[in-house]
Image (cartoon, helix red, strand yellow):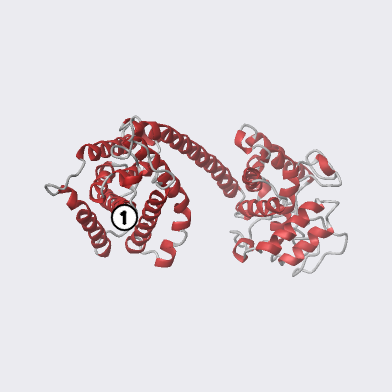
Amino acid sequence: MRATRGAARAYIAVVAAGALCGALPALRAGAGTPWVTVALLTGLYLACELPGRGPFFGSSVPIHAGSFFPLLLAAAFLLPPAAAALVAVPGSLVGRVERPPVAARRVWRAAQLAVTVWAASSVHALLGGPATLGGTGTGGLPDLPHALLPACAGALAFSLVLTALDGSVLAVAERVPPRRAWSGLLPRSLGPHLVHGLAGLMMAVLWRGPYGPLSALIVLLPMYISCWVFAQYHREHTAHRATIRALVQAVDIKDTYTRGHSERVGRASVLIARELGMDQDRLEVVRFAGILHDVGKLGVPTRVLRKDGPLTPEERQVIELHPEYGHEIVRGIGFLGEARDAILHHHERLDGSGYPYGLSGREIPEFARVVAVADAFDAMTSTRSYRRGRPVPAALEELKRCSGTQFDPQMVRALVRGLDRHGWSAVTAAGTADGPGAPAPRDEAVPAARPSRVPPPQASAAGPGAAPGPQAPADRRR
């Protein structure tokens, strides 16, 4: 929360006051509050939140929002609304907070969850939910499936109130436009909250049965372990992304001329792969392949990458080693999978005249054939210091012309279909971060030039890397 003064502090105070009003009836004498159950549930929620602050556990525990919502929903089903509102308060007040202001965030979280649990418990009680849970007076058996309706209604109320409060605090404290603040919150959270509600119902039924409070462990322990596993996976995935970002930034620093090119090639590669029907796991890997296709530039001398004049044959040979350099750089990164072959072979040509190994046809890995088309497409549609980018239709015509010799026709058709469906953002296809006088790219897989006279400066028939005029080096396209 960037601004916690004025309206933001007032809003937090209003929600906190609402939470206090909701919980007050449980504190009155003669209210009949089941304090043992309240204490046990409150202690369990507190115990779940505390490890996130400990030096031993640190970030190894699942402290993200929603990890312990089943416990709060079980409290909403087992307790009267006023008593249920108390369960979330101690754990929220001591839970881990990532960003300042810490005190304001803790008070907000405690008030928000207290109001949310109170609402869920009220709806559950209004629909007669407590009577369907079984226990003493009902023969010990829950009234299933009738218990599902009030439980799901309570979970729905939980989701509605929580997302309403989440959106409103963004609008007030972060000054996010209201429409954007609530956009997508409910659809993203409703499904998980209903699942949490079913887990909470299971806990409540077991709690009322012969297992008593031990039921919390029966439900919570496997759920806690699954949350921990998911958190570990999330951290590993984040580390993978950080590795990719670091490599791309290193390439951009070394070859500033094509800054942004790698990200766009990754996007175009995914566009093609979707049209080919690849599953989600492969889409992620082909995106990595597109983003990292030029990582081998790190092994090419900077003076060669940034040279203003034509390359010598020796310098050309050095440039053509960059796919092998790239493969060596990433060969030990296991999660890249098929992307490693794409990095090695994205300059192969279907007719066998490419490099580094002169593979042809289906010998070229599928991901390499995808990235080759995406690379050429972005090279043609991006503006360079020595020529303007081609329009998308012109670039597609050039790709079609070179299908079967340089590019796989299947990949070119997939790109055409993807662009027909989704378009190519003007922002994405616009110029890169080149400055005036930036050196030419040395490795883009643009279509080979037609044998003809030198084209006029404003429109090079040789493709996006062709020379725009007599002064420009003739090897700019690669």
Specify the quadrant of the image occupied by residue 257. bottom right
Q: Nearer the viewer, residue 22 or 108?
A: 22
- The amino acid type found where label 1 is placed reads Leu
Q: In the displayed structure, would residue 185 be above or below residue 232? A: below
| Picture residue at 70% right of the left edge, 59% below the top | 418
Which quadrant of the rendered structure holds the N terminus?
A: bottom left
Residue 308 percent location from the top left of the image: 69, 55
In-image side of 442 versus 404 (left or right) = left
**Which residue is farthest left?**
29
Q: Nearer the viewer, residue 125 or 422?
A: 125
| Picture residue at 66% right of the left edge, 55% below the top | 439
Residue 361 percent location from the top left of the image: 84, 44
Q: Nearer the viewer, residue 163 or 476?
A: 163
The residue where tag 1 is placed is 126
Q: Is residue 386 visible?
A: no
Residue 276 percent location from the top left of the image: 73, 50
Q: Residues within 10 Å of mark 1 (few under 14, many from 20)?
A: few
- The secondary structure type at the circle numbered 1 is helix
In-image side of 194 versus 314 (left or right) = left
